[in-house]
């Protein structure tokens, strides 16, 4: 069975979702980040897994459900932090971030039978999910992160290593207020949509 990894930041004002400010305040952006993380962790908790791990920059809060091991992120760039997350796993592992609150347990129940890896592209050119049947940190180190070609470079890295890659559906990350509106519409009953609606009611867009 697969280990499910979530790499995330503690949702503190000024440290998360900075591209949402403006129109949102840092406190509101942090509230949206917490809601997105809550939805993500609930989906992971409801999916079958050998182990559930939160790879966290910061401290856990009341948003963390039971059943997760919490490990700190290592120092270094995002590629190094992702690589270290996989290094802590033995056996198949699937890693996601906290920016896709529309994720469902079904999307996380990935059958790697006949494949060595799975890859979930994001609309902004990155990726929302990466799964490896045999975790190898070297597959991530040196991949340029947070660029329009991050996803393409990462997938090419997998193929160049001779891995058979299963492609997952393309999802939209929440980075901007337009992303927030679109993603909330895709998952209207989640915490993220509810928080966005609350902020709208408070008079902000």
Image (spheres, rainbow, N blue to C red):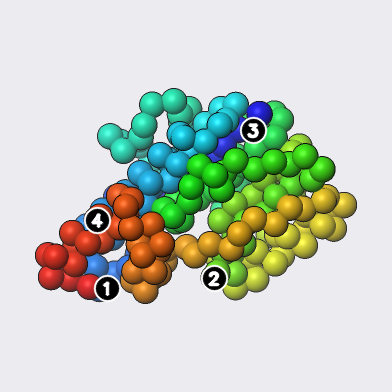
Identify the element where label 3 is drawn. Answer: loop
Q: Nearer the viewer, mark 3 or mark 1?
A: 3
Residue 96: x and y in percent read 54, 48
Name the quarter where the N terminus is drawn.
Answer: top right
Number of residues whose C-alpha sits closer than 10 Å to that of mark 3, classed few (under 14), some (14–19) or many (20 or more): many
Residue 2 numbered mark, or none? 3
Q: Verify CB contact (< 8 Å) between mark 2 and mark 1.
A: no
Point out which mark residue 205 bears.
none
Residue 22 - label: 1
CA neighbours of label 1 inside 10 A, class few (<14), some (14 to 19), many (20+)? few
Left or right of 127 in this view: 17: left
Tell me the element at label 2: loop
Q: Quadrant of the C terminus?
A: bottom left
Residue drawn 29% across the image and 69% down it: 21
Q: Residue at x 64, y 55 (%)?
A: 168
The earlier-in-sequence mark between 2 and 3 is 3
The residue at which mark 2 appears reads as 124
Query: Which one is closest to the eye, mark 4 or mark 2?
Result: 4
Pick whichever of labels 4 and 1 is earlier in the sequence: 1
Q: Within 10 Å of the Cα at label 2, are there few (<14), some (14-19), or many (20+) other Cα atoms?
A: some
- Mark 1 or mark 2, which is nearer the start of the sequence? 1
Marks 2/1: CA–CA distance: 20 Å
As drawn, the label of residue 195 is 4
Q: Nearer the viewer, mark 2 or mark 3?
A: 3
């Amino acid at each position: 069975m697969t280990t499910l990894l979530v790499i995330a930041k503690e949702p503190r004002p000024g440290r998360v979702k900075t591209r949402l400010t403006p129109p949102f305040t840092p406190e509101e952006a942090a509230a949206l980040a917490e809601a997105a993380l809550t939805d993500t962790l609930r989906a992971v908790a409801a999916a079958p897994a050998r182990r559930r791990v939160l790879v966290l920059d910061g401290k856990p809060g009341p948003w963390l459900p039971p059943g997760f091991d919490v490990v700190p992120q290592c120092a270094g760039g995002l590629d190094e932090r992702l690589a270290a997350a996989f290094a802590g796993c033995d056996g198949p592992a699937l890693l996601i971030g906290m920016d896709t609150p529309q994720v469902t347990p079904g999307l996380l129940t990935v059958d790697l039978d006949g494949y060595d890896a799975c890859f979930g592209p994001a609309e902004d050119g990155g990726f929302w999910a990466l799964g490896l049947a045999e975790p190898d940190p070297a597959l991530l180190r040196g991949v340029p992160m947070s660029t329009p070609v991050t996803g393409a470079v990462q997938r090419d890295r997998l193929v160049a290593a001779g891995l058979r890659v299963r492609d997952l559906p393309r999802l939209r990350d929440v980075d901007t207020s337009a992303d927030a509106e679109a993603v909330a519409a895709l998952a209207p009953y989640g915490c993220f949509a509810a928080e966005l609606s609350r902020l709208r009611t408070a008079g902000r867009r």
